[in-house]
Image (tube, helix red, strand yellow):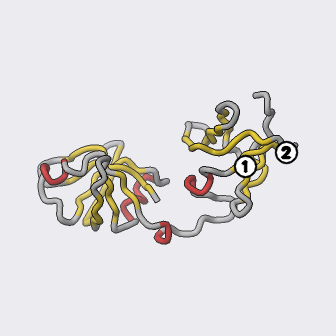
Amino acid sequence: MVLGQVNGLFGIRGWVKVFSHTEPRENILDYGPWLLRTPDGRVREFRVLEGRRQGKGLVARLEGIEDRDAAAAWMGAEISIPRSRLPEPDEGEYYWTDLIGLEVETVDGVVLGTVAYLFRTGANDVLVVDGARERLIPFLQGDVIREVDLEGGRIRVDWDPDF
């Protein structure tokens, strides 16, 4: 499960800047070891030795990365962990990865497409649904999102199919 990305270098002692998909963002530091996968396909597991908030982002020191050059080799790498290391979500909470690929249909049974991805806005999360056309549907449980059926592979929404 992808939790973030190495998106910069910090200092000369091998620290990396981290973009986190976790909420709150510091939670990524608690899940380890990290499996880093570079855009060119290199993969390696790293233990997180320490990490902290730095400005608006995070920085981390990883075992085996001792200098800036070694850290630079992992720029752009995805940070992932096995799904089994994540806690089970509470009732009514979902990991975004579990929603991707689910079929989206209206409460009247009109199929709108499947969830391609999600993104966060200041107000709420948004489902991007690919079908006959792309739709952006706010993830507002109880209002727009009426049912999430992970086992059935479906999300039912109160949404006008013409919108």
Seen as rendered, the residue at the extreme top is: 162
Residue 34 appears left or right of 68 = right
When asked about the image quadrant of residue 117, the answer is top right
Q: 134 and 157: which one is in front?
A: 134
Tag 2 secondary structure? loop
Q: Amino acid at mark 2?
A: Gly
List the residue tagged with mark 2.
Answer: 109
Residue 64 spot, x, y in % from top left: 17, 64
Determine the CA span between mark 2 and mark 1: 18 Å
Residue pictured at 63% horizontal, 45% vertical: 115
- Image disc number at residue 141: 1
Tag 1 secondary structure? loop
User: Which part of the image, by quadrant, shows the C terminus?
Assistant: top right
Residue 80 spot, x, y in % from top left: 40, 59
Residue pictured at 64% horizontal, 32% vertical: 134
Q: 119 and 131: which one is in front?
A: 131
129 lies above or below 99: above
Among the two numbered marks 2 and 1 on one chain, the one whose residue lies closer to the N terminus: 2
Q: 19 and 81: which one is in front?
A: 81
Q: Amino acid at mark 1?
A: Gln
